[in-house]
Image (cartoon, grey):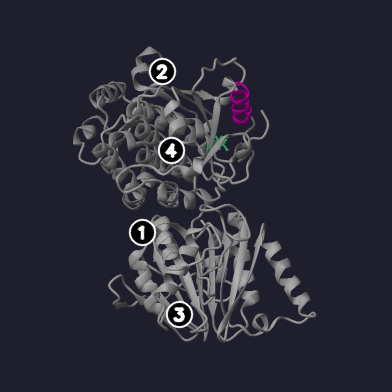
Amino acid sequence: MCGIVGYTGSRPCRELLLAGLGKLEYRGYDSAGLSLVGDGRIDSVHAVGKLSYLQEAVAARDERNGGSLATLDAESCAGVAHTRWATHGRVTQENAHPHDDASGRVHIVMNGIIENWAELRRRLESEGAVFTSETDTEVVAHLIASHLEGDLFGAVRRACLELRGHYSFVAVSADEPDLLVGARKECPLVVGRGEGENFFSSAIPAFMAETRQVQFVEDDEIVTMTPDEVRFFDAAGKEVEREVTEVDWDEATAEKGGYETFMLKEIHEQPDAIAETVGDRLRPDGTLDLDDLGISDEELRSFRRVLVVACGTSYHAGVVARYAIEEWSGVPVGVDIASEFRYRKPLFKTNDLVVGITQSGETADTLAAMRLARSSGAKVIAITNVMGSQATRDSDGVLFTRAGLEIGVAATKTFVAQTAAMYLLGLKLAEVQGSLPPEVMAGLGSDLRAMPQHVQHILETQTEHLAEIGERFRDAGFFFYLGRHIGLPIALEGALKMKEISYVPSDAYAAGEMKHGPIALLDDRTPVVCVATDLPMLDKMLSNMAEVQARGAHVIAVATEGAHQVAENAEEVVYVPRTDWLLQPLLAIVPLQLLSYYVARARGLNIDQPRNLAKTVTVE
Ligand code: AGP
């Protein structure tokens, strides 16, 4: 979730690069740097902290040069720059981008994760490469340099053939000073076209003050850029045409990547959030590399119980995890609302693992519950999206979600990232317990890896239908949600989203509980959202839906593609792709987020800043 800027043209580019980074900083970053290319050499500056620290470092360099700009700063008309949101390696000056090969001839800035970085690094080290950072990006710089025979494009092409993962990067070489080469695989990269100058960036706002002529780089493409020419090549090395689009966004829209709200943008970032969170932690054979957790396999094997503490949406991710972890590993899981847990004198046992889920890492009740557990001798880990947050200090280990900064008050992409992280933990517990056969682990691993494409498919095929349903029920006075088993936390989360942004009263229940009271609420005005994805007990869910219809209420079902029987008991069906049934929550939640979104939109509400809510709840 980093920010990339690149420039090649006729103007000295240092200030252009810094200005571009300034437009990306709203995403919240932890270090920054830039590299300027000159005749036969490249100079870099890096700084930890906000962009202002990089600007100070640049100014200090001018000062050291007696108040005048260093030659490259004054003359360089090509360069790359980066703001970092750490995913791989700590927040340090050494890990800040750009990274170079040891000779300093190739510099790159990158967004994403290289899954096979460790094996590539071992090989490059055995060939003599010397590394100075902990990042996977430096591996790519060395790899490109190892293929460099005076042709940066060819070297990038050969390097990409060896990379596994998802990334976008821009490379420069001291030997071809006005050439930038960009590559993209599942991470954003766009081109800005100017007169005698061109730009790369991970987001359009970075160059919008200079040009509004944009070309979008597609997956697996490599792009060469000089001041006068931009050429696109597909994975086979064949040159492809790419149309130039003129963007007419205002600045606020541009910050939202062209979406009307941050929430909608973040809903569309969910494929990325899942891909980044799973990333290199899941090996192709379905085994897990959770080394960043800092808890040995032996200790993980010793846990006899998992207790999850969290609030709001994070609590719902914990409830999803309970079903999956128990099913896969046989380890019992308790899930508590943190504000209840901390005051009910919970009983701890030896070999308890307590997991605090909190996207912000600052929620007062979750932190208090984690501290209570820790002071009682339990091992505590945090699942959080924010490096350096309090939760990372109040825990023995951390599993970071890698969703990027979430600005919309209603949590969306952090929910799927938390759920993905908890699935990883569940699979890891199954691995150390030996509770699943290797082929089942491998199958679940490959299903989990396919989730980003499935979410993308839902966004592309179901959004319009959900906007229509939202419009149809815009004036509903009450929304009821039903789910069973793994569908229940999704019903709970869907109802929470509806309350938060549309202010329509909503309730969610375990479908089997409906007859024990809430069925009295139903009449011919009530939309009832039913999570009816693949479940061993789907027939029970279908009976509940029939009971709802018999009361004249309107069933809106989320179902798995191919499950046509669901349509017999529903007025509206939104289909999600088929996958392992325990992983369905990652897909089923997407239609419910969109439904609440379109109801709120139809009601003309401020979706990103709903009334009375704060993004981070730091008081009880
Ligand atoms: C979700 O849409 C809410 N904004 C809220 O329930 C949130 O999930 C809760 O406050 C917990 O926050 P945390 O994940 O930062 O701890």
Of the numbered discs 1 and 2, the one sitting upstream in the chain is 1
Residue 259 in picture, x, y percent from top left: 49, 56
Distance between the alpha carbons at the discs numbered 3 and 4: 39 Å
Q: Nearer the viewer, residue 258 or 416?
A: 416
Range of residues picked out in magenta: 365-376
**Numbered disc in front, either 1 or 3:** 1
Number of other residues with Cα within 10 Å of mark 3, as a class: few under 14, some 14 to 19, many 20 or more: many
Q: Earlier in the sequence, mark 1 or mark 3?
A: 1
CA gap, disc 4 and disc 1: 23 Å
Q: Between marks 1 and 3, how big is the CA–CA gap? A: 24 Å
Residue 52, quarter of the rendered image: bottom right
Q: Residue at x 54, y 17 (%)?
A: 348
> Residue 518: which numbered mark, if any?
2
Q: Position of residue 589 (x, y in %)?
A: 39, 39
* Disc 1 target residue: 164
Residue 298 in the figure: left or right of residue 15: left
Kindly check if marks 1 and 2 are in contact, taking CB atoms under 8 A apart as contact: no
Return the disc, 4 or 1, that comes first in the chain's sequence.
1
Mark number, residue 419: 4
Earlier in the chain: of badge 3 and badge 4, it is: 3
Label 4 neighbour load within 10 Å: few <14, some 14-19, many 20+: many
| Residue 370 painted magenta | yes
**Label 2 or label 3, whichever comes before in sequence order:** 3
The answer to whether one can see residue 311 in this image is: no
The 10 Å Cα crowd at callout 2, few under 14, some 14 to 19, many 20 or more, is: some
Q: SS at mark 3?
A: strand
